[in-house]
Image: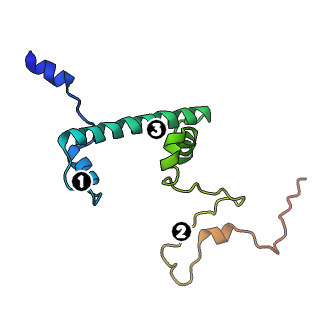
Amino acid sequence: MAEEENTEGAIRPQFPTGRVKRIVKLDKDINKINSDALLLVSRSTELFLQFLSEKSAEVAIEKKRKIVKLDHIRVAVKRHQPTGDFLLDSLPVPTQLSDKPPAEKTRHDKPLPPGTRRIDYFFAKSANEAPVQINES
């Protein structure tokens, strides 16, 4: 029964501690990290990601979307000033929407055998072709 109380009170991080330790050691100033400090870094990372995901989900719901996208994360970061101060510069630049329609996807993976052409060319109208008129009697 005493063991059950100890396991219930213990905080288990969601992230693998070995991986968090390797990430922390990427900093050249850090040679060793205490297990308590490792637990705190892991837990605070969990809490930060939970906060960011909740705020991003709220933005997605406001925009009536079911999927959280980068733009929703960017808006959530902008709304929270302390997060925006350090994270906004690290987020990828948003894509600019152009007025052009998206280009059609054509498959030009393999060259066509000699003497053949794509079926798209067969159905395409040439510029000098007159429209077909149907006479109904």
Provide the residue designation for mark 2. 107
SS class of the residue under badge 1? helix
Quadrant of the image containing the N terminus = top left
SS class of the residue under badge 3? helix
Which of 50 and 133 lies nearest the eye of the viewer? 50
Provide the residue designation for mark 1. 22
Q: Residue at x 88, y 57 (%)?
A: 135
State which tag comes first along the sequence, 2 or 1. 1
Question: Residue type at mark 3?
Answer: Leu
**Residue 42 in the figure: left or right of residue 97:** left
- Local packing at callout 3 (Cα closer than 10 Å; few below 14, some 14-19, many 20+) is some
SS class of the residue under badge 2? loop
State which tag comes first along the sequence, 3 or 1. 1
Q: Residue at x 76, y 73 (%)?
A: 126
Q: Which mark is residue 52?
A: 3
- Local packing at callout 2 (Cα closer than 10 Å; few below 14, some 14-19, many 20+) is few
Outermost residue toward the bottom? Answer: 114
User: What percent of the width, then of the height, locates residue 94?
Assistant: 58, 54
Question: Residue type at mark 2?
Answer: Arg
**Residue 38 in the figure: left or right of residue 84:** left
**Residue 83 in the figure: left or right of residue 1:** right
Which of 83 and 63 lies nearest the eye of the viewer? 83
Q: CA distance from mark 3 to mark 1?
A: 23 Å
The label nearer to you, 2 versus 3, is 3
User: What percent of the width, then of the height, locates residue 26?
Assistant: 28, 58
User: What percent of the width, then of the height, locates residue 131?
Assistant: 84, 65
Considering only vertical position in the picture, is 17 above or below 8? below
Question: Residue type at mark 1?
Answer: Arg
Q: CA distance from mark 2 to mark 1?
A: 43 Å
The label nearer to you, 2 versus 1, is 1
